Image (spheres, helix red, strand yellow):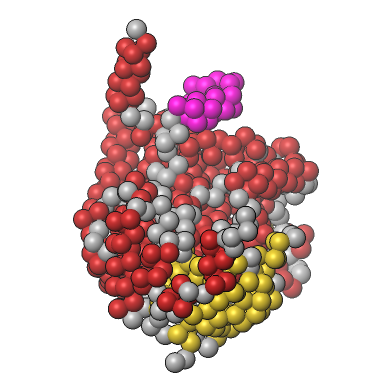
Amino acid sequence: MKRYLPLLALLAVVIFVQLLTGWTETGFYLTQLTMSAYYSLVIIGLCLLMGYAGQISLGHAGFFAIGGYTSAILTTHNLTPMKDQALVVLLAKVGCLVASKDEYGAELLVAQPWVACLLAVTAATLVALVLGGPVLKLKGHYLAMATLGFGTIIYRLVLATWLCGEADGISSVPPFQLLPGLTVSGGFGERISNYYIAWGLVVLFMVLLINLVHSRAGRALRAIHGAEDAANAMGVNTARFKLTIFVLSAAVAALAGVFLTHYNGGIGPSEAGIMKSVRYVAIVAVGGMASIWGALIMGTLLNFLSMRGVFGTYDDAVFGAILIIIMLFAPEGLLRLQLWPRLKELKKSWGGEK
Amino acid sequence: MTPILEVQNLNRRFGGLQAVSEVSFAVAVGQIKAVIGPNGAGKTTLFNLISGTIPADSGQVIFNGQEIQGKQPWQIATAGMARTYQNIKLFPGMTALENVMVGRHCRTTAGFAAGMLNLPWTWKEEREIREKSLELLELLEIGDLAQVEATSLAFGQQRAVEFARALAAEPSLLLLDEPAAGLNMHETGEVARLISKIRDRGVTVLLVEHDMSLVMDISDEIVVLCFGQKIAEDVPTAIQHNPEVIRIYLGDGDV
């Protein structure tokens, strides 16, 4: 199948980069590459919503935060004081809770990370369903503003809620054991395995989303992007398709939030910030809107550079500037920037003036 | 003959303008029926009411014995009514073939999960969608343009893609909104031939049209609208000699 060849190439690049950092003893790069992978996951999900279905969301950091915070709260909130209550006893019995001791030897009773992850993604899905129903009736700027409003609400809620740690966020989030011997954590010894967990997840979702783009549902989404009323008149239940892709991309963002939170061992309110949402949108635009590969490449590259501190304290300003420049000079995305014909055109217009 | 479509006392008002007023008519199976009338007569509004794009204020639309007034356009399309647009509405960024493939949407079933997992049973459906769509492009004599981006085609070809897309939904009734708009005389003749060809495949056709030559050549019956009201309904030869129709089209002489 021709569509899977680039995915094999991606897999090869992922392995090659890891080997390269091993040979050159620059394994520390893997940390940022792992984090970039999780952000790229959000971005490819958003790319499907924006680039293919044509619906903008300036609230995806909100969904990322719902995932991350839900998982963080559930896996850190100590239920020991309530351990005699019937519900807690029941949950502990069916294996939804794990008991351990904290660094001072006190008893700790928290949710099992798998359970927390499931609940976190479910929470984001439900919020997306409730929000998407009414909001997706809006178009263009109005949809952008409504989702921006949602993002703002989540940000302020996170900042104001005691349970979310207010401005400090939540720390000492425990590792997330996926399988015996495979754990999402920022431990030094698990750097390589976590790099592969993150990129494995990216490859998995690339496969799923690329399949979707080439399917009947994917065609319907692109049709909605192009001419919504004509798609409806051709039998596409446009409201349902828009809602489904919105919820799907929100769930992917939440999943990325869960994994990155366990990887970092914590989450802070900046993850829910508006600038994060703007950054995701900017990167989808840089990648060329309707290009899932462009979104992945640009998402990884720009997040990696940002986290290596290349943009310094101007980080957010750089992303704002990128957005302006892309919209002005390469609305089709950087990878589709046809430099050579453009230069020729420029030369011609100069020649004409002489 | 049992009518495939029955419009009963349909009304629609836009602010102070009664765009469609108490319009009733029926379309028999296998007919080519035309709705004509001067600019602003309410023809396109009538079409939008029938296809569910806008809701009616009152009245009924009965399609295949089923009340469809108030249903969503996608439900009406699934029930077997497909339409084209006066100002062509193709899906940009998609090839001619892909545009037609979207037309098969309401006759196929693969959803999000099946698509994402690329389940084997969808392959057969996908192949069928592709083959049927190509066949329709061939029928409309633009098979060689299948892989060209639809919106970059010439105007007449875009109209053919729209026809193919509508036919892909296997409609029992096809609504054509000014199929000859913007076409020259030769192209209009081609469209007339196409419409007859479509009817010969067993599809009933209801069209709104400005171009008299097209309407008089191919229609079995004509409904004449003026200021939202039906003023005549008859066979083309009778319409041509109807004094009321002549008056609204040519004026009544006392200028």
- The residue located at (25%, 67%) in the rendering is B139
| Res A117 → quadrant | bottom right
- Residues B2 and A192: in front is B2
Front one among B68 and A99: B68
The answer to whether residue A232 is visible is yes
Residue located 60% across and 50% down the image? A139
Q: x%, y% of residue B152?
A: 34, 46
Tell whether position A324 is magenta: yes
Identify whether B108 is placed above or below A68. Answer: below
Relative image position of residue A4 (x, y in whole percent):
27, 52
Q: Residue at x 30, y 67 (%)?
A: B194
Residue span colored magenta: A306-329
Secondary structure mainly formed by the magenta segment: helix
In the image, is residue A126 above or below residue A333? below
The number of discs equals 0
**Residue at figure coordinates x 51%, y 57% from the top left:** A228
Q: Residue furthest front?
A: B254
Of residues B184 and A268, the one drawn nearer to the viewer in this rendering: B184
User: Which x, y percent locates residue A79?
Assistant: 72, 59
- B194 drawn magenta: no
Which of the image's four quarters has the N terminus of chain A? bottom left
Q: Residue furthest left?
A: B144
Quadrant assignment for the C terminus of chain A: top left
Q: Position of residue B159 (x, y in %)?
A: 37, 57
Residue at the top extreme?
Answer: A354
User: What is the quadrant of residue B173 in the picture?
Assistant: bottom left
